[in-house]
Amino acid sequence: MAFIRDTELVLRATVELVNTLPHTDTSGEDTMVSAEQLEDFATRHAYTGSRTHDDRELAAVRGIRNRIHELWTVDRDASVPLVNAMLRDGKALPQLVKHDGFDWHIHASDPSDALAQRILVEAAMAFVDVIRADEYARIRVCQADDCRGVYVDFSKNGSKRYCDSGNCGNRMNVNAYRRRKADQPA
């Protein structure tokens, strides 16, 4: 299973954005609270277009996180109206673009649109690809006992069980090892 490069990049950015929500993090803290954190996120994920770099932009991006998170709480069929609403609300108009070393790919919003609107539309477009490829089973919530982080399983065999944000796989493996050791006769 492989999504095209731009879809995978947007899915990874979307996962990171959703995992800034307090209820997805093992610490229970919101990790997108400053303009600097938003700037770091937008830069690392190469979001292009207009930026205001102010508290309103931060609030708008923070405001779409729960809406995007909802895509991890539903199945494939139930995700369709959510994705369609995101595309409609974002005034999506898909176009091929080439910029900043990226070959031809699709942008579905105008570079002058607000950052939150562009993020919402890009996330929706990535989920269009997931839905069309019938790969929605790869949209998952971490199975660690103390984590509600989200992830997309990009593994070849679709066997990933834990997110990457809290070292969950390693932590759960250590816990299982300790339980096995405790159950062994002395």
Image (tube, rainbow, N blue to C red):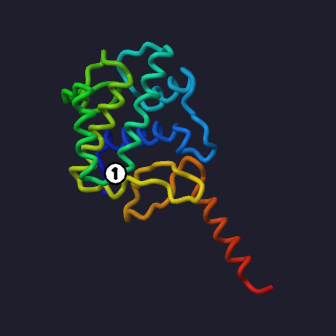
Question: Circle 1 is placed at which residue position?
Answer: 74
Residue 138, picture quadrant = bottom left
Percent of width and height locating residue 88: 22, 30
Q: Quadrant of the N terminus?
A: bottom left
Q: Residue at x 54, y 30 (%)?
A: 32
User: Which quadrant is the C terminus positioned in?
Assistant: bottom right
Location of residue 63 with respect to 155 vertically, above or below: above
Label 1: state its secondary structure.
Answer: loop
Whether residue 105 is visible here, answered yes or no, is no
Q: Is residue 178 visible?
A: yes
Quadrant hosting residue 108: top left
Q: Nearer the viewer, residue 186 or 153?
A: 186
Q: Residue 128 in the image: x percent, y percent?
A: 24, 43
| Viewer-proximal residue among 26 and 37 | 26
Residue 162 falls left or right of residue 72: right
Amino acid on which disc 1 is placed: Val
Rendering coords of residue 163 (x, y %): 51, 52
Answer with the quarter of the image where residue 117 lies: top left
- The residue under the point 35% across, 45% down is 71
Q: Dot 1: within a 10 Å radius of its alpha carbon, few (fewer than 14), some, or many (20 or more) residues?
A: some
Is 67 placed above or below 24 here? above
Identify the residue shown where x is 57% and y is 44%: 25
Q: Position of residue 39 (x, y in %)?
A: 50, 23
Decide if residue 30 is on the left or right side of residue 185.
left
